[in-house]
Image (cartoon, helix red, strand yellow):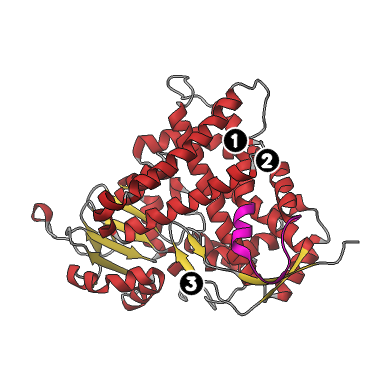
């Protein structure tokens, strides 16, 4: 650990041998393992890998802010995130670094300005209403695949303003999920790559990715042949031009951006809403308060309602879709008492921070009221990272908040939910996905 004879002061943690011996426990339940390690090492610890590089895991909000915001120019996404994910999901802004990231982030950004998102409200609300019209009722309903499909329909309709065949929608949705699962297995079980020459698992996954890209390419070509104007994100991207050349986005890069928008635009929202319904099911007083707010507003107003926002924020606090994120140091750096060499990977553990009793009273309790307290606003801004932080703050945060507010309003208007006693399994993939979310669902009486 002394490149160029330098001495570094890493946080206490695990040696390479200790990390190998504990790898099974980490892979079996990473959130449980990291949470226990955070308690053991007071919120920040290091792991030495076999390649003699170090990982630093932290739920210290000051350290997280330093890496993601204050000194962000010294940090890129790691090779695992930026390069391996790009093989399957394309080189969109989510999985790129440096100038390439900055250029394409700026190209996509105009489509997510608040006024542009507001222009999509009608599409979002119409999609939610049509989806809920077919929502099943009964005992022990698995909510996750149903909510996942609603979120997927919303992002597809907002991107393309076209009715894709149900078979195509289902194929795209299923394939995105399969590719993500494969990518996570590839990271968590690197030895499986030795079997690729035999089972061709990587080639099969790349073929799935190519098929998705072909579908998107067909949609783009169809749109380009149509002279009509469409009020959707695809129109914005097709009309976007590079500042230096005035040229449009090349087709392959355009497909990359759309792949990322589809992935990020439905996966995180589906996860958050599913967790939120699970949290709300036993909380009749919270649902009554939401419905009391609904009595004095329409669905468009929900996105501006303080209590709706508080409920959603509390759901994201307890189950953040981005449960962890990584950055790699481009140069030697230091934070507080720690110093570390370039190449060190810093992992920000949002899940742990959001449940840290040092920063949150009754940290494991679902209590939306905490987000209504004027006295806690400054504290929350430093300790709450539902959409990340810094220049790479989630580009679709306003879109996501509107989507979740509209869904919550429409769903509670039509349905009543109650718990079954089942606790969803946490699946920490790229995002924090729930396993089955089993609830009782009944239709509410007609509105008067």
Which numbered dot is residue 118?
none
| Left or right of residue 117: residue 106 | left
Q: Earlier in the sequence, mark 3 or mark 1?
A: 1
Q: Position of residue 232 (x, y in %)?
A: 64, 35
Secondary structure at badge 1 equals helix
Spot occupied by residue 88 in the image (x, y as percentages of width and height): 40, 44
Q: Is residue 105 above or below residue 183?
A: above
Q: In the structure shown, which secondary structural element does the residue marked by tag 3 occupy?
A: loop
| Res 77 seen here | no
| Gap in angstroms between the C-alphas marked 3 and 1 | 36 Å
Density class for disc 2 (Cα within 10 Å; few <14, some 14-19, many ≥20) is some
The residue positioned 25% from the left and 59% from the top of the image is 191
Q: Residue 69: horizontal and vertical position, in percent?
A: 41, 51
Residue for badge 3: 355
In the image, the segment drawn in magenta is 133-150
Q: Residues within 10 Å of mark 1 (few under 14, many from 20)?
A: many
* Residue in front for this viewpoint, 209 or 188: 209
Total numbered badges shown on the rendered structure: 3
**Picture quarter with the C terminus:** bottom right
C-alpha distance separating marks 2 and 3: 34 Å
Q: Are marks 1 and 2 in contact (CB under 8 Å)?
A: yes
Quadrant including the N terminus: bottom left
Disc 1 target residue:
233
User: Which residue is located at x 36 percent, y 59 percent?
Assistant: 185
User: Mark 2 = which residue?
Assistant: 120
Q: Residue at x 74, y 56 (%)?
A: 134
Which of the 4 quarters of the picture holds residue 206? top left
Question: Between tags 3 and 1, which lies in front?
Answer: 1
């Amino acid at each position: 650990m002394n490149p160029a004879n330098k001495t570094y002061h890493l946080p206490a943690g695990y040696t390479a041998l200790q990390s190998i011996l504990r790898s099974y426990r980490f892979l079996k339940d990473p959130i449980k393992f990291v949470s226990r390690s955070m308690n053991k090492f007071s919120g920040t610890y290091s792991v030495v890998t076999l390649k003699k590089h170090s990982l630093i895991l932290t739920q210290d909000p000051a350290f997280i802010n330093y890496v993601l915001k204050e000194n962000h120019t010294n940090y890129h996404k790691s090779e695992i995130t930026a390069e391996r994910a790009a093989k399957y999901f394309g080189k969109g802004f989510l999985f790129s670094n440096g100038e390439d990231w900055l250029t394409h982030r700026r190209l996509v950004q105009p489509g997510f300005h608040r006024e542009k998102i507001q222009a999509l409200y009608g599409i979002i609300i119409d999609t939610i209403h049509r989806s809920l019209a077919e929502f099943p009722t009964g005992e022990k309903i698995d909510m996750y695949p149903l909510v996942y499909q609603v979120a997927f329909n919303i992002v597809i309709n907002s991107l393309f303003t076209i009715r894709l065949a149900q078979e195509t929608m289902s194929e795209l949705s299923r394939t995105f999920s399969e590719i993500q699962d494969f990518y996570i297995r590839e990271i968590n079980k690197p030895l499986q790559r030795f079997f690729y020459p035999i089972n061709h698992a990587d080639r099969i996954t790349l073929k799935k990715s190519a098929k998705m890209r072909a579908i998107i390419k067909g949609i783009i070509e169809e749109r380009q042949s149509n002279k009509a104007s469409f009020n959707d994100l695809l129109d914005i991207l097709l009309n976007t031009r590079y500042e230096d050349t005035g040229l449009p986005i090349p087709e392959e890069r355009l497909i990359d951006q759309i792949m990322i928008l589809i992935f990020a635009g439905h996966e995180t929202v589906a996860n958050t809403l599913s967790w939120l319904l699970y949290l709300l099911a036993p909380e009749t007083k919270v649902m009554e308060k939401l419905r009391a707010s609904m009595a004095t507003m329409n669905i468009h107003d929900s996105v501006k309602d303080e209590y709706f926002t508080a409920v959603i924020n509390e759901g994201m606090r307890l189950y953040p879709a981005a449960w962890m994120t990584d950055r790699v140091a481009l140069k030697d750096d230091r934070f507080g008492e720690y110093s570390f060499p370039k190449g060190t990977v810093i992992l920000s553990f949002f899940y742990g921070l959001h449940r840290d009793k040092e920063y949150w009273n009754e940290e494991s309790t679902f209590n939306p009221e905490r987000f209504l307290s004027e006295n806690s606003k400054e504290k929350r801004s430093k300790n709450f990272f539902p959409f990340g932080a810094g220049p790479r703050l989630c580009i679709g945060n306003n879109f996501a908040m509107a989507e979740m507010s509209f869904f919550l309003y429409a769903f509670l208007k039509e349905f009543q939910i109650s718990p079954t006693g089942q606790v969803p399994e946490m699946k920490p993939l790229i995002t924090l996905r729930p396993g089955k979310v089993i609830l009782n669902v009944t239709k509410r009486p007609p509105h008067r």
